[in-house]
Image: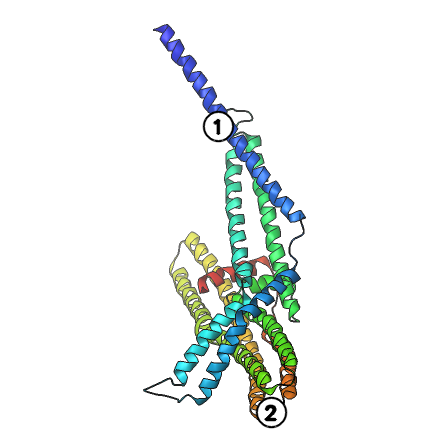
């Protein structure tokens, strides 16, 4: 019986050692794999990445290949809109034609901005999520490290937890560097259209609820300027042939109509979605402040009164930042309204010239002048972005943006 017990004990010990060795080797393999992955990632950073100009050229080239046929399709719709009846029981009226134009414009916009919109906003959000997850793991590992043994074959040691924490910190450094590169690319995209933004202003833009719209408009303007340059080249190569020149001029008119459409989409979103939401949030917060004040006045317990007081202070802070958020949205909308006035004025001149001019050279001159319009409009429609005064305001803006979405 004793021999059996000793045998079982020996087998148990061997099994325990074998199990602990497996666990140990698994941990070591995990750490080695993770370190190799980080090293590979780090090595890729040392290789020469695509420059912003390379990425921009790729986007512009893809945009031209994508929208050239769509612009020509747009000229047919624009011509049809001129002669379509206001309403009709049979056939297409202006509303039906306009619906087709709007759908076409939405497709063109996607072609103009390409993958950049996803790259700027969604990629940064994905990286920040990874950073937050790693930070949560770091907190857990720190807690576990306190009670971990110095040496063990079965359990994770203090040193091993420290290695895990260092690996996660290294990952986060890589992710933060990726975010910095993306922000610099976005900053350069604004520089391309003559709008100089600091990194602090870029941070504000990426935090605001209308940030996507402003980025989209800016990228679209840069691409439209490029597309117009290609149309100018085609007009130049048409050798004064009026029929060809007018065809390309019609495509140019579609571009001007598109500018007004993009601006109107932002104005409508501001008036119908963003501002009503922030107004409701302000009203709800103000009502909550008054309700809390009433509860505080009725309560005699000092501890609860202190909690109510703290809640009121927090709500007042939210109300203050929300009101500033509203002013920023109003200011941005008004800037786009001003920019749209310039775009509409150029569109009116373009339409009038198309009807009156019979020389392709004169049409060429009008298209050439529109290049200056794109630069002017781009500068007007990007709002004056005031950097966050402190980290608390930045956090509150982000919090409010999440509530407004």
Q: Which residue is pictured at 41% across the width and 88% down the height?
A: 84
* Image coordinates for residue 103, horizontal then vertical, percent: 44, 74
In the picture, which quadrant includes the C terminus?
Answer: bottom left
Instruction: Say the numbered circle drawn on residue 290.
Output: none
Q: Which residue is pictured at 61% across the width and 47% down the height?
A: 173
Task: Indicate left or right for 43 with 265 as reference.
Answer: right
Q: Which residue is pictured at 50% across the width and 44% down the height?
A: 136
Residue 198 in which image quadrant: bottom right
Crowding at mark 1 (Cα within 10 Å: few <14, some 14-19, many 20+): some
Of the numbered discs 1 and 2, the one sitting upstream in the chain is 1
Q: Nearer the viewer, residue 234 or 142?
A: 234
* Image coordinates for residue 76, horizontal then vertical, percent: 48, 82
Task: Indicate left or right for 135 with 292 as reference.
Answer: right
| Element at label 2 | loop
In the picture, which quadrant includes the N terminus?
Answer: top left
Instruction: Look at the picture and state if 76 lies above or below 182.
Output: below
Say which residue label 2 marks: 357
Instruction: Look at the picture and state if 95 lies above or below 51.
Output: below
Q: Is residue 239 visible?
A: yes
Crowding at mark 2 (Cα within 10 Å: few <14, some 14-19, many 20+): few
Say which residue label 1 marks: 23
Q: Which residue is pictured at 56% across the width and 38% down the height?
A: 34
Q: Is residue 270 visible?
A: no
Instruction: Look at the picture and state if 279 lies above or below 123.
Output: below
Number of marks in the rendered image? 2
Residue 345 in which image quadrant: bottom right
* Image coordinates for residue 184, horizontal then vertical, percent: 64, 59
Residue 252 in which image quadrant: bottom right
Instruction: Look at the picture and state if 321 lies above or below 361.
Output: above
Q: Nearer the viewer, residue 323 or 333?
A: 333
| Element at label 1 | helix
Q: Nearer the viewer, residue 307 or 74?
A: 74
């Amino acid at each position: 019986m004793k021999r059996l017990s000793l045998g079982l004990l020996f087998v148990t010990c061997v099994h325990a050692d074998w199990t602990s060795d497996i666990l140990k080797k698994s941990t070591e393999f995990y750490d080695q794999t993770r370190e190799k992955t980080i090293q590979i990632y780090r090595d890729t950073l040392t290789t020469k990445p695509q420059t912003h100009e390379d990425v921009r050229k790729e986007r512009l080239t893809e945009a031209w290949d994508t929208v050239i046929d769509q612009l020509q399709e747009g000229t047919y719709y624009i011509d049809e809109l001129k002669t379509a009846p206001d309403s009709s029981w049979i056939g297409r009226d202006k509303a039906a034609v306009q619906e087709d134009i709007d759908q076409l414009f939405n497709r063109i916009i996607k072609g103009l901005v390409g993958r950049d919109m996803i790259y700027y906003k969604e990629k940064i959000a994905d990286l920040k999520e990874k950073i937050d997850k790693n930070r949560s793991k770091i907190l857990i590992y720190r807690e576990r490290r306190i009670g971990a043994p110095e040496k063990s074959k079965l359990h994770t040691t203090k040193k091993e937890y420290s290695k895990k924490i260092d690996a996660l910190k290294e990952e986060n450094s890589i992710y933060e560097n990726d975010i910095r590169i993306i922000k610099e690319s976005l900053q350069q995209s604004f520089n391309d259209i003559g709008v100089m933004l600091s990194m602090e202003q870029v941070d504000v833009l990426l935090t605001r609820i209308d940030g996507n719209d402003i980025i989209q408009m800016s990228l679209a303007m840069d691409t439209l300027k490029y597309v117009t340059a290609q149309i100018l080249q085609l007009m130049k190569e048409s050798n004064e042939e009026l029929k060809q020149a007018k065809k390309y001029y019609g495509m140019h008119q579609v571009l001007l109509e598109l500018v007004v459409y993009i601006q109107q989409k932002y104005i409508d979103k501001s008036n119908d979605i963003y501002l009503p939401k922030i107004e409701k949030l302000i009203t709800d917060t103000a009502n909550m402040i008054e309700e809390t004040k009433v509860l505080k006045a009725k309560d005699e317990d000092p501890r609860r009164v202190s909690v109510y007081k703290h809640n009121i202070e927090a709500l007042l802070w939210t109300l203050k930042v929300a009101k500033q958020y509203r002013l920023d949205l109003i200011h941005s909308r008004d800037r786009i309204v001003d920019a749209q006035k310039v775009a509409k004025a150029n569109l009116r001149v373009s339409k009038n010239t198309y009807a009156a001019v019979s020389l392709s050279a004169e049409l060429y001159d009008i298209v050439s002048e529109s290049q200056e319009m794109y630069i002017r409009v781009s500068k007007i429609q990007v709002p004056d972005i005031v950097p966050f005064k402190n980290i608390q305001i930045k956090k509150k803006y982000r919090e409010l943006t999440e509530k407004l979405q």
